[in-house]
Amino acid sequence: MGTNVRNPNSILMGTGILYVGGMNVGQLTGDVVVDLGTEEYKIEAGFPRATIKKYIIKEPSTISAAMLEVDPAVLAVLFPRFTAASEASGTVVVPTEHVGAISSTAWRGLTHRNVLTAGFSLSKGSVISVAANPGDTVVNVANSSGFTAGDSVTLAGGGKTETKTVASVQVSAKTITISAGLTNGYSLGATVSNGTDALTITTDYLVNPLDGQVLRVEGSSALLEGDTVVASYSYTQQASRSLSFGGKISSEKFPIVFEHERDDGVKVVVELYSGQLAGNLAIPFSDGKETVVGVVIEGTADSSRAKGDQIGRISWVG
């Protein structure tokens, strides 16, 4: 008969990347198993007995994986009853950083990890695409869609900063016209931040402080999908890290995402909207082979979502 392959790209091989609470857990080894099951209660009657009705009484949904990297920051997220600590050698301030386009489906990385949420701010903005000189009233930016006439904008770069008012915006030309000429000159890559449209953490965006990432909150009206943003934050430079345990009870939940990339570049994305670790933490140390930490994460229902979409989803993206 020969083969009956409809699409060779639908044949999957290999594992992928596991994200826990937005954090990439690192290299995986062995199989990643996505198990989406049901447990049923059956009513049987007659002779011979036959099933006359059955009910789904449980929807166990799990992702099992084995981590090759033993990172205390990752383990602290997976096991909320543990406490991660660090001895920091100092705090560094990042006045402005162009993050780029933000999304509600993929975390966007900052330049630094170990970000402090206190004082963290995110605003719509862009970078200067053509050097600007003192006296200029037209500023060329990589993306002008985040600005409107009347907005207060702050330009920063090279240790210089100033605030101006937008007179008009030319989206197709990617320029903004300001009401008064620039006091300073700014080179390519300097940031332009919108100070009028205030963005709020947890309402408009989320921050993953350990990995230094930001994510748009789906449904935010102030921050749209694909808007370019500028961040201002501080981060700690760590000298050592530790993981302590004992006496802490936690029922924290976190979103789980597993991404597998097909040969044609399409990503198969498995999401558990809200997950909890099932089982214990076991870290085997061996003379003969590498240490592998196995985890099983169980999805929990989010009753705020529509029926049929309360535990998770599988998407083909690309």
Image (spheres, grey):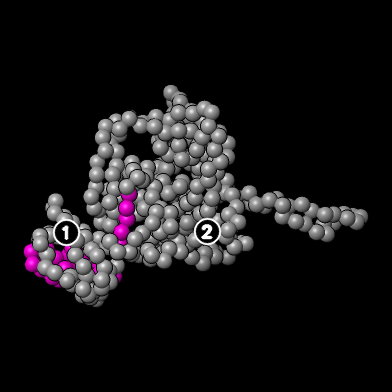
Left or right: residue 81 versus residue 37 is left
Q: Of label 1 and label 2, which has the lower sequence position?
A: 1
Residue 66, above or below 96: above
Asked if marks 1 and 2 touch (Cβ < 8 Å), the reply is: no
Q: Where does residue 231 sit, x and y in percent of width and height?
A: 29, 54
Q: Where does residue 29 sit, x and y in percent of width and height?
A: 45, 40
Residue 64 visible in the displayed image: no
Q: Where does residue 249 sit, x and y in percent of width and height?
A: 55, 34
Disc 1 crowd, CA 10 A, few/some/many (<14, 14-19, 20+): few
Residue shown at 28%/57% (left/top)? 230
Does the magenta-highlighted stretch encompass residue 128?
Answer: yes
Furthest residue to the right? 47
Which range is magenta?
Answer: 120-145
> How far is disc 1 from disc 2 in space, using C-alphas?
47 Å
Label 2: element kind = strand
Q: Front-most of 31 and 11?
A: 31
Does the magenta-highlighted stretch encompass residue 10?
Answer: no
Residue shown at 47%/51% (left/top)? 258
Find residue 247 and report its image quarter: top right
Residue shown at 43%/23% (left/top)? 287
Counting every numbered tag in the picture gives 2
Residue at the spot of label 1: 162
Q: Front-most of 75 and 235?
A: 235
Instruction: In the rendered structure, find residue 314 and report the number of the disc placed on it.
Output: 2
Left or right: residue 30 versus residue 133 is right
The type of residue carrying mark 2 is: Ile
Left or right: residue 125 versus residue 318 is left
Residue 255 visible in the displayed image: yes
Residue 165, above or below 215: below
**Quadrant in the picture for the C terminus:** bottom left
